[in-house]
Image (cartoon, rainbow, N blue to C red):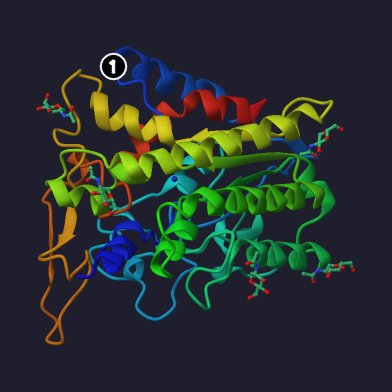
Amino acid sequence: MAPGQKLLFTFFLCSSSFLLTGKGVEVVEGSSRHHHQHHHHVKHNGVDTKKLFVFGDSYADTGNNRISNGDSWKLPYGITFPGKPSGRFSDGRVFTDFLARYLGLKSPVAYKFRRFGGKHLKYGMNFAFGGTGVFDTTAPYPNMTTQIDFFERLLNESVFTPFDLETSIAHVSLVGNDYSAYLSRGGSVQGLQTFIPQVVNELVVDIKRIYKLGVKKISVTALQPLGCLPRSTIQNSFQRCNDTFNQAVIFHNTLLQQAVTNLNNNHTHGSPIVIIDLYNAFLSVIQQNATNQQGSSKFANPMRPCCRGISPAYYCGNVDQNGNNMYTVCQHPNNYFFWDDSHPTQAGWEALTTALQPNLDSLQR
Ligand SMILES: *[C@@H]1O[C@H](CO)[C@@H](O)[C@H](O)[C@H]1NC(C)=O
Ligand SMILES: *[C@@H]1O[C@H](CO)[C@@H](O)[C@H](O)[C@H]1NC(C)=O
Ligand SMILES: *[C@@H]1O[C@H](CO)[C@@H](O)[C@H](O)[C@H]1NC(C)=O
Ligand SMILES: *[C@@H]1O[C@H](CO)[C@@H](O)[C@H](O)[C@H]1NC(C)=O
Ligand SMILES: *[C@@H]1O[C@H](CO)[C@@H](O)[C@H](O)[C@H]1NC(C)=O
């Protein structure tokens, strides 16, 4: 594989998105708080109005990317939940599902499966589409602007009302596809220096637009450590994170933090924008090892993915012309943090959600 190609594969995320203390006691405390606090449905005349609207990529997608041969619609994706492929880039639930549960909602229907006028709309809608970014990545995937257009159209058609939005939350997942696409088109690692600010600026444009459309609370992901994903660490047998990529991630996250602070400072009533700090959440799980309630290690080797191609030419879910599996999958996905070369397992997301508790709590305020 040429170096450029290698980078492309190293960087390409078909995606969708958490923080962990790594200390058993705090994990337990976090989960018990979870049960007590997070089911405040907002009711007006007995009608639930709180909804979740989701934009972004594979860390959040629950079924929208069904184009051509999207891996998430093939085995072994979905084997843990719902038991068959469902368009989630994981063995089971993804961040959207855990966020919805935290908010006391069911996971919102994927835009692709919307049915107007029905109870399906009760929990909001998920516009996230695996593989996308704020800019175009893979044609004809809908970039974030287009996803927000879909949302705006539904508002124009009164499928959702301004009243719905008053008490709703939007989640924006952006986990690196703009950078994969940039590198695959021949961009250099040095060039990221000028590209990263463009991505963050466009992300801020998108956040402001969602806010102007009437959603009063918005969460946005900070980038996870891209250099720690299996697609990067496969070079050293999943032992060490690639610092070059993580430095780029830190730059992106610093700019995002500044922009969000700026937006929130200009707001007189609280802080409408909340950062979901995937960077520290991932590192915390990877470095300190998540522990279960018995205090034993949950992810014995947190850098190694459960499902991977039998050689660098193949990915999790690939089959050859004769239908033979060109991948191996672990026996117990629950013991793995990473599912494939870019995405966490359901157990991984669960650990991340626990670690992200402080961020999620500020989303409730
Ligand atoms: C998003 O996609 C639309 C439709 O293809 C395109 O017109 C627009 O320029 C894209 N926006 C960005 C920011 O790339
Ligand atoms: C929604 O309506 C506004 C006002 O009429 C219009 O400017 C906008 O283009 C519409 N958006 C979509 C996506 O149809
Ligand atoms: C990190 O990735 C870059 C780009 O693929 C590569 O040139 C570099 O050697 C990697 N660094 C380490 C420490 O693996
Ligand atoms: C916040 O307000 C300051 C001062 O009015 C302004 O310069 C800045 O552009 C605003 N920031 C945003 C993100 O709107
Ligand atoms: C995780 O914990 C296991 C068992 O305690 C240990 O062998 C392993 O080195 C740890 N991994 C990391 C990345 O700290």
Residue 26, given in percent of the width and then of the height, sits at 37, 15
Q: Please state the total of marks drawn on the protein image.
A: 1
Q: Residue at x 76, y 25 (%)?
A: 270
Q: Are there few (<14), some (14-19), or many (20+) residues within 10 Å of tag 1?
A: some
- Residue wearing tag 1: 24
Left or right of 333? Residue 49 is right
Q: Is residue 108 left or right of residue 156?
A: left
Task: Look at the image and tell me whether residue 173 can be seen.
Answer: no
**Displayed quadrant of residue 103:** top right
Say above or below: 136 vs 265. Answer: below
Q: What percent of the width, then of the height, locates residue 163?
A: 83, 47
Viewer-nearest residue: 2 or 223: 2
Location of residue 354 by image quarter:
top left
**Please, which residue is most extreme toward the front here?**
190
Ligand 2 placement by image quarter: bottom right
Vertical side of 31 occupied by 88: above or below: below
Residue name at image x 36 percent, y 61 percent: 12
* Residue 72: image location, x then y, percent: 35, 66
Question: Outermost residue toward the bottom?
Answer: 321
- Residue 31 spot, x, y in % from top left: 41, 23
Q: Nearer the viewer, residue 361 or 34?
A: 361
- Which image quadrant for residue 324? bottom left
Is residue 43 visible to us here? yes
Amino acid type at mark 1 = Gly
Write the residue at 45% across / 65% down. Answer: 181
Query: Is 122 on the left or on the right of 62, as rendered?
Result: right
Kind of element beneath mark 1: helix
Instruction: Tell whether circle 1 marks a residue whose Cβ is less than 8 angstroms from ligand 5.
Output: no
Q: Nearer the viewer, residue 227 or 82?
A: 227
Q: Nearer the viewer, residue 198 or 361?
A: 198
